[in-house]
Structure formats: C-alpha cells, structure tokens
Image (cartoon, rainbow, N blue to C red):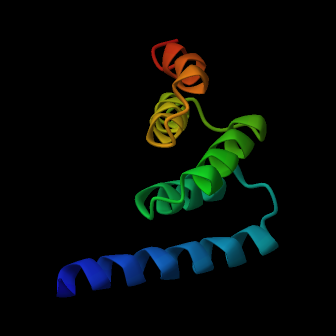
C-alpha cells in the first residue's frame, strides 16, 4: 500500500510540474506528451486524451508519435468508447 501511495503522489507531483512547464513553454509537444502519460497512469483518461491530441496537433516528434496514438486508443478503450479507439489504433504502425 505504501508503494501505491508514493506512486500516486509521484504522479500528482509530475502533473503539477509539467503544468508549470506548460506555462513557460506553452503548447510544447513533448511536455504535453509526458503530462498525458501522467494523467493516463493516474487513470484520468479524458485529460490524457486531451494532452495526447494536443501534442499531436503541436508537432510531436515522429519517434514518439506512434506511442501517442496507442495511448489515445487505450484511453478511449478504458473509457469504454471503443468506436473512438479504432482510429488511433489504426495510426500506430503508419
């Protein structure tokens, strides 16, 4: 249980730090990607989807673009929105 609490606190701190970074570097694709991952692992899937999509819109680097699409699809699936999960999954290998 202690490890889980530390993990949750780490994710909260990560989200706070990355939010501050976005205040300085507005729209930074890598920061949005990393904050999206923190939201995703916090099970805040709607916020994760928003950050992932914003990262894609703002010119994410091709090296992590497939991961963005993958996580958007998984987040939609976790929200039981399977129809919306199809398109991101189809872009993972492109």
The residue positioned 53% from the left and 61% from the top of the image is 39
Work out whether residue 8 or residue 21 is closer to the camera in this orientation and state it. Answer: 8
In terms of depth relative to the viewer, which is nearer, 24 or 16?
Answer: 16
**In the shown orientation, is residue 82 left or right of residue 29?**
left
Residue in view at x 54 percent, y 26 percent: 85
Residue at 63% across, 59% down: 31
For residue 9, above or below residue 40: below
- Which quadrant holds the N terminus? bottom left
Picture layout, residue 32 above or below residue 60: below
Above or below, 87 against 9 in this view is above
To which quarter of the image does residue 22 belong?
bottom right
Q: Where is residue 54 in the image (x, y as percent from the top left)?
A: 74, 44
The picture places residue 78, in percent across and down from the top left corner, at 44, 42
Q: Could you say which quadrant of the image residue 35 lies in?
A: bottom right
Q: How many labels does the image show?
A: 0
Front one among 62 and 73: 73
Residue 63, image x, y percentages: 50, 33
């Amino acid at each position: 249980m202690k490890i889980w609490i530390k993990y949750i606190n780490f994710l909260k701190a990560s989200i706070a730090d990355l939010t501050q970074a976005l205040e300085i570097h507005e729209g930074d694709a890598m920061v949005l990607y990393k904050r999206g991952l923190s939201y995703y692992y916090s099970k805040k899937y709607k916020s994760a989807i928003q950050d992932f999509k914003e990262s894609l819109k703002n010119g994410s680097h091709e090296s992590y673009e497939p991961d963005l699409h993958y996580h958007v699809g998984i987040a939609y699936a976790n929200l039981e929105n399977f129809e919306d999960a199809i398109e991101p999954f189809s872009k993972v290998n492109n």
